[in-house]
């Protein structure tokens, strides 16, 4: 069982930056594929970015060039660096882990609010 704890959300003005962190426990972190999702009110949860266990990344088109996902296997953490934030980035951001058996695990979510 993988436990995920996010941190780093908050309120920021448009154009600002935030870095989200996700600490994982309960499994060998280097074997996990990690991702960040977000869900805005009234909308479906969507994939923001993913970094697999080989450190290959993919991104939602709307965040390319503004967001960067990374991982530190020594610290069991993954990060989402968000820059040039827009009001439409406002959402609850969730950390996700998928193990080699394709079991998916979720964090509790952290609120990001971007004011205009």
Image (tube, helix red, strand yellow):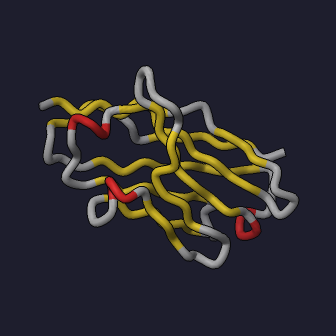
Q: Is residue 60 left or right of residue 54?
A: left
In percent of the image, x 22 and y 46: which residue is there? 85
Marks counted in the figure total: 0
Q: Is residue 47 left or right of residue 74?
A: left
Q: Point out the residue furthest to the right here.
A: 101
Residue 50 or residue 81, whichever sits in front: 50
Find residue 105 and report its image quarter. Answer: top right
Q: Quadrant of the C terminus?
A: top left
Name the spot of residue 110 as percent of width and height, x first. Answer: 47, 33
Residue 45 or residue 105, whichever sits in front: 45
Name the spot of residue 56 as percent of width and height, x first. Answer: 55, 76
Q: Is residue 7 left or right of residue 102?
A: left
In percent of the image, x 54 and y 58: which residue is there? 78
In percent of the image, x 73 and y 55: which residue is there? 98
Q: Point out the residue furthest to the top here.
A: 42
Name the spot of residue 51 as percent of width and height, x first. Answer: 56, 66
Find residue 111 and report its image quarter. Answer: top left
Q: Quadrant of the N terminus?
A: top right
Name the spot of residue 107 as percent of width and height, x first. Answer: 63, 38
Whether 58 is drawn above or below 45: the answer is below
Whether 30 is drawn above or below 112: the answer is below
Whether 46 is drawn above or below 48: the answer is above
């Amino acid at each position: 069982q993988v436990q995920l704890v996010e941190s780093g959300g908050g309120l920021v003005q448009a154009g600002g930056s935030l870095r989200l962190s996700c600490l994982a426990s309960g499994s060998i972190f280097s074997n996990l594929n990690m991702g960040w999702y977000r869900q805005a009110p009234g909308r479906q949860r969507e994939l923001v970015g993913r970094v697999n266990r080989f450190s290959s990344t993919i991104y939602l088109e709307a965040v390319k060039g503004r967001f960067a996902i990374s991982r530190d296997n020594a610290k069991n953490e993954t990060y989402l660096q968000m820059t040039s934030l827009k009001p439409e980035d406002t959402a609850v951001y969730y950390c996700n882990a998928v193990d080699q058996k394709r079991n998916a695990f979720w964090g509790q979510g952290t609120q990001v609010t971007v004011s205009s």
